[in-house]
Image (cartoon, helix red, strand yellow):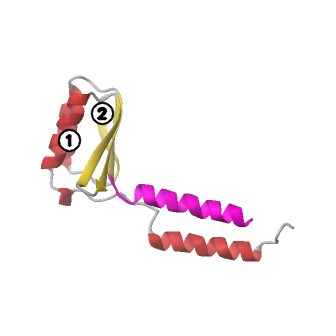
Amino acid sequence: MYLLILAVIGVAVFAWWTFKNALFTVSIVDGRVASTSGTVPPRFLGDVSDIVRSPPVRSATIRASRDAQGARLRFSGDISESQAQRLRNVFRLTSSAQFTSGDSPFTWSNFWRASIVASLLSWILPKGR
């Protein structure tokens, strides 16, 4: 029982650690660009649309996150290396103040609430011995 609780808490900490630095996610499907999380300035979305138009990108995901140097873009999908570099250049020209992080459920207050609930459940539920 305690191992299960420890595993759940471990997964919650891992998820929080992974998503705490996320700024935004942009999805590209059949050349259409849409923000799926976080707030992306319209000008940046317009630049992304222009860049992925030629050569056409069928499917891709762009994720922005904070790191020690400021922010970083990660790409997955059909984006060429030249398109990725152009996107990095446009991203660097956009003020970081214009980007806000997405609504993440992985906050410290939610983490502590979940750990308290897990502790109470382990105390209340019958122990299988």
Local crowd size for mark 2, using a 10 Å CA cut-off: few (<14), some (14–19), many (≥20): some
Question: Helix, strand, or loop for circle 1?
Answer: helix
Q: Which residues are magenta?
A: 1-23
Image position of 21 with respect to 43: above or below: below
Q: Residue at x 15, y 55 (%)?
A: 95
Circle 2 sits on which residue?
A: 32
Going from N to C along the chain, the mark reached first, 1 or 2, is: 2
Q: Give the quarter of the image for residue 124.
A: bottom right
Q: What residue lies at 60% left-to-right and 76% top-to-bottom?
A: 116
Residue 46 seen from this side:
no
In the image, is residue 31 part of the stretch drawn in magenta? no
Residue 13 at what x, y percent from top left? 51, 62
Name the residue located 15 percent from the left edge and 50 percent from the top edge. Answer: 94
Q: Secondary structure at mark 2?
A: strand
**Which is more foreground, mark 1 or mark 2?**
1
Looking at the rendered structure, the kind of residue marked 2 is: Arg
Q: Nearer the viewer, residue 15 or 101?
A: 15
Q: Main secondary structure of the magenta part?
A: helix
Q: Residues within 10 Å of mark 1 (few under 14, many from 20)?
A: some
Choose top left, top right, bottom left or bottom right for residue 102: bottom left
Note whether 125 is above or below 95 in the view shown.
below
Quadrant location of the N terminus? Answer: bottom right
Q: Which residue is mark 1?
A: 88
Quadrant of the rendering where the C terminus is positioned: bottom right
Residue that appears at 66% across and 74% down: 119
